[in-house]
Amino acid sequence: MPEPVEGHFSFFILHLYLNMFSFFKRKHLDPFPFQILKTDYHSHIIPGIDDGSPDAETSIMLIKGLMDLGYQNFVGTPHVMEDIWQNNTETINAAHQILQLSLQDNGIDKNIRQGAEYLVDGNFEQLLADKKKLLTIKDNWVLIEISFIQPPKQLHNVIFEMQMQGYQPVFAHPERYNYYQTKKDELQKVKTAGCLFQSNLLSFLGYYGPDVLKLSEWLIAQGMTDIVGTDLHHENHLNALRNLKLTPALKNLLDSNSFKSLISA
């Protein structure tokens, strides 16, 4: 028997009330306190050498935007990929110098650190084999990423070799690798191997989709997230970051003693 019309109406009112409650609950979350982080360890603000900022003028705009959010220090981490962005220390240093001169011309007293985001591929393995000095994002921290299609079979060997050479591997945006959605145990193995985990702040906005959002929150719940960064490439990313709220997951991260000790070190 069909439900009475008033039953449908009552359900509609309840559904509307719950949606409004959820909306206002989200609306009243505090803005994310970027100033607590101080340093953005993952960004593509070094101009003209990857899919990030195309020129110094854009870099200045992006850096000013990050400063307005509350960041004080910046690390440019251009991609190093043998098949796409064939960067090396020399190309990165040259582009970094262009950026530093542009900062001076614009009266911005900031020294941007030049790091890199190394894809774990044949080129990176060769750099390790040749014991080439790697660009770091802090102290001995080296930012690495892996293919979005499938994890490299040699990942754990590479992590071990990095550690043997005195580097601390920092695993970029683990929540964005879709194949880990159903293989969280494999992600835990990467963590146990000795990596610091760096999540993208945009992940907590749902910018990359709901599955990435869920995995980023799961990583925090498991105590596996060590660093958060912008992974800033362009103005659209900057505009999205302006809408970031202090969600319960992010608040738990900022309140955790391990996170506090790491960002203050």
Image: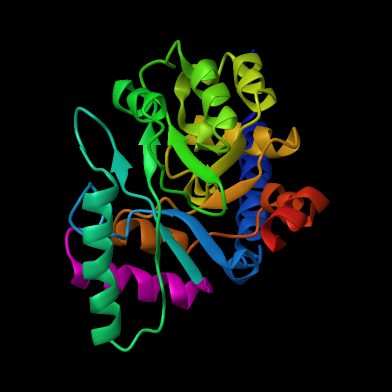
What range is drawn magenta here? 54-72
Q: How is the image coloured?
A: rainbow
Q: Residue shown at 35%/30% (left/top)? A: 127
- Asked where in the image residue 80 lies, by quadrant, the reply is top left
Q: Residue shown at 66%/29% (left/top)? A: 194
Q: Residue furthest front?
A: 130
Q: Residue furthest right?
A: 257
Question: Looking at the magenta stretch, what is its main secondary structure?
Answer: helix
35 inside magenta stretch: no
Q: Residue furthest bottom?
A: 107
Q: Looking at the image, which is closer to me, 61 or 103?
A: 103
- Asked where in the image residue 67 lies, by quadrant, the reply is bottom left
Q: Residue shown at 19%/33% (left/top)? A: 84
> Which x, y percent locates residue 235?
29, 62
Q: Quadrant of the C terminus?
A: bottom right
Left/right of residue 53 with respect to residue 41 in the rendered view: left
Q: Looking at the image, which is closer to me, 199 or 109?
A: 109
Q: Is residue 189 above or below residue 256?
A: above
Q: Looking at the image, which is closer to me, 263 or 16?
A: 263
> Which x, y percent locates residue 197?
60, 38
User: In this figure, what is the number of numbered marks?
Assistant: 0
From where the camera sits, is residue 137 visible?
Answer: yes
> Which x, y percent locates residue 40?
50, 60
Q: Residue shown at 31%/20% (left/top)? A: 122
Q: Quadrant of the N terminus?
A: top right
From where the camera sits, is residue 147 visible?
Answer: no
Left/right of residue 1 with respect to residue 176 in the rendered view: right
Q: Is residue 256 above or below residue 194?
A: below
